Image (cartoon, rainbow, N blue to C red):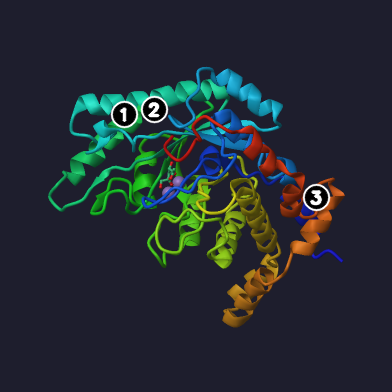
């Protein structure tokens, strides 16, 4: 007997998780990048791999791009290529963290000529979004300083506002700007957008189509991330998630691998706050697969999100509310934990089969021989990777 009601299954059927194109390229640490045979050589091959994830799970209909990593001559061709593979292009991510000119800042830089270059990069991203049909421009800034006294913290916030305002003004009516925060790295003393509060203050000053992106790996250990989710939803400014797992810092491991219970708590607040299956909240992965195969790594990731969403939907919210109002601490916690401890995997497998999907997408993909095929086909050329 399935422990998932038809109402829950109907909600799960709407779930969509965006994949990052860069998850399919090689990545690693500053010590070593381990190449995988068959790694995509260009954005077209990354999209073909991403489409596999959707084919086996029906969970990942869109793919996010990163510019310049995914720069191509004709984005209309890339868009049609995606559609031919049964997916579409999603968020466009800007990149101001790999250019020597931006060593001391991009949108916050002291020199107007450098700021001009950084703003222009974002205007190019908006042009690309028109060609790809993308709604969201996602901005993560590597800007900050390493030593106290090195930078004028206040001046940088003011310049950041001016730069963002120019970018925001260029967006089409249906497009949005999503500002991601991160508490440290690559800067080690101060970061210009270190936390949700700063991101919120900056986007609120722009207008209604500016939102905050919450990357789960971008918080100090012990941070109550679900509280931030609640607050941003309450304020109507939660634009997107970058899902991943962390043990130490920005580890970019498979979502739900390090702490499934935290993922459950986050998804519970998403549902509680009306953010589940709401067009304003984009669910994305932002991960790298340094030592495991990339396509199955992404399949496992979207399944982890689906599984924890199903468990979060199982919380008996009526009973929970009654226990909260009665001040029954232990009963409230029991209700919450009961849902978390419910194994939904058999019910999800059965439901998948009923929809013509493989009961076990990991096994079905492994049996397909796709990885051996791309390893044989994609010889030669430069493998795309994080930063290539
Ligand atoms: C920064 C980040 C940001 C980038 C991505 C590659 O750490 O999370 O989202 O675009 O990694
Ligand atoms: Mn991110
Ligand atoms: Mn990150």
How far apart are the alpha carbons under marks 2 and 1? 7 Å
Residue drawn at the location 61% of the way across and 76% of the way down: 332
Which residue sits furthest left? Answer: 149
Residue 211 placement (x, y as % from top left): 45, 41
Quadrant (top left, top right, bottom left, bottom right) of the C terminus: top left
Residue 47 placement (x, y as % from top left): 61, 33
Quadrant (top left, top right, bottom left, bottom right) of the N terminus: bottom right
For marks 3 and 1, the one nearer the N-term is 1
Res. 358 mark: 3
Q: Is residue 230 left or right of residue 250?
A: right
Element marked by disc 1? helix
According to the picture, the residue beneath numbered tag 1 turns out to be 118
**Residue 4 seen in the figure:** no
How far apart are the alpha carbons under marks 3 and 1? 45 Å
Q: Residues within 10 Å of mark 1 (few under 14, many from 20)?
A: many
Element marked by disc 3? loop
For marks 2 and 3, the one nearer the N-term is 2
Work out whether 27 lies above or below 85.
below
Q: Quadrant of residue 278?
A: top right
Q: Are marks 3 and 1 in contact (CB under 8 Å)?
A: no
Res. 122 mark: 2
Residue 198 placement (x, y as % from top left): 33, 48
Q: Nearer the viewer, residue 377 or 96?
A: 377
Q: Nearer the viewer, residue 375 or 20?
A: 375
Res. 197 mark: none
Work out whether 91 lies above or below 315.
above
Q: Is residue 175 left or right of residue 157?
A: right
Q: Residues within 10 Å of mark 2 (few under 14, many from 20)?
A: many
Element marked by disc 2? helix
How far apart are the alpha carbons under marks 2 and 3? 41 Å
């Amino acid at each position: 007997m399935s422990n998932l009601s038809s109402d829950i299954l109907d909600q799960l059927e709407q779930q969509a998780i965006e994949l990052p194109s860069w998850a399919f390229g090689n990545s690693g640490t500053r010590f070593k990048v381990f190449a995988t045979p068959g790694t995509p050589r260009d954005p077209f091959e990354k999209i073909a791999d991403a489409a596999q994830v959707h084919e086996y799970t029906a969970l990942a209909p869109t793919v996010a791009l990163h510019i310049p990593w995914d720069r191509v001559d004709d984005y209309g061709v890339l868009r049609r290529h995606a559609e031919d593979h049964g997916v579409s292009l999603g968020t466009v991510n800007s990149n101001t963290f790999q250019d020597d000119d931006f060593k001391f800042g991009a949108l916050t830089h002291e020199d107007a000529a450098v700021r001009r270059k950084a703003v222009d990069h974002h205007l190019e991203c908006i042009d690309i979004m028109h060609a790809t049909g993308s709604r969201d421009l996602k901005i993560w800034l590597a800007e900050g300083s390493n030593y106290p006294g090195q930078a004028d913290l206040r001046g940088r916030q003011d310049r950041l506002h001016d730069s963002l305002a120019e970018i925001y003004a260029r967006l089409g009516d249906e497009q949005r700007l999503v500002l991601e925060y991160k508490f440290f790295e690559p800067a080690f003393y101060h970061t210009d957008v270190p936390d949700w509060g700063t991101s919120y203050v900056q986007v609120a000053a722009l207008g209604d189509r500016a939102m905050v992106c919450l990357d789960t790996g971008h918080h100090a250990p012990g941070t109550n991330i679900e509280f931030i989710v609640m607050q941003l939803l309450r304020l109507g400014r939660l634009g997107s998630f970058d899902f991943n797992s962390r043990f130490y810092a920005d580890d970019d491991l498979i979502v739900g691998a390090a702490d499934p219970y935290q993922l459950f708590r986050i998804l519970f607040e998403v549902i509680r706050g009306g953010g589940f299956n709401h067009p304003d909240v984009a669910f994305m992965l932002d991960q790298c697969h340094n030592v495991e195969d990339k396509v199955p790594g992404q399949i496992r990731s979207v399944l982890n999100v689906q599984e924890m969403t199903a468990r979060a939907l199982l919380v008996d919210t009526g009973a929970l509310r009654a226990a909260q109002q009665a001040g029954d601490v232990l009963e409230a916690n029991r209700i919450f934990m009961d849902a978390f401890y419910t194994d939904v995997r058999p019910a999800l497998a059965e439901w998948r089969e009923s929809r013509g999907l493989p009961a076990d997408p990991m096994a079905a993909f492994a049996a397909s021989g796709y990885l051996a095929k791309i390893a044989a086909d994609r010889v030669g050329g430069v493998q795309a990777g994080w930063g290539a």
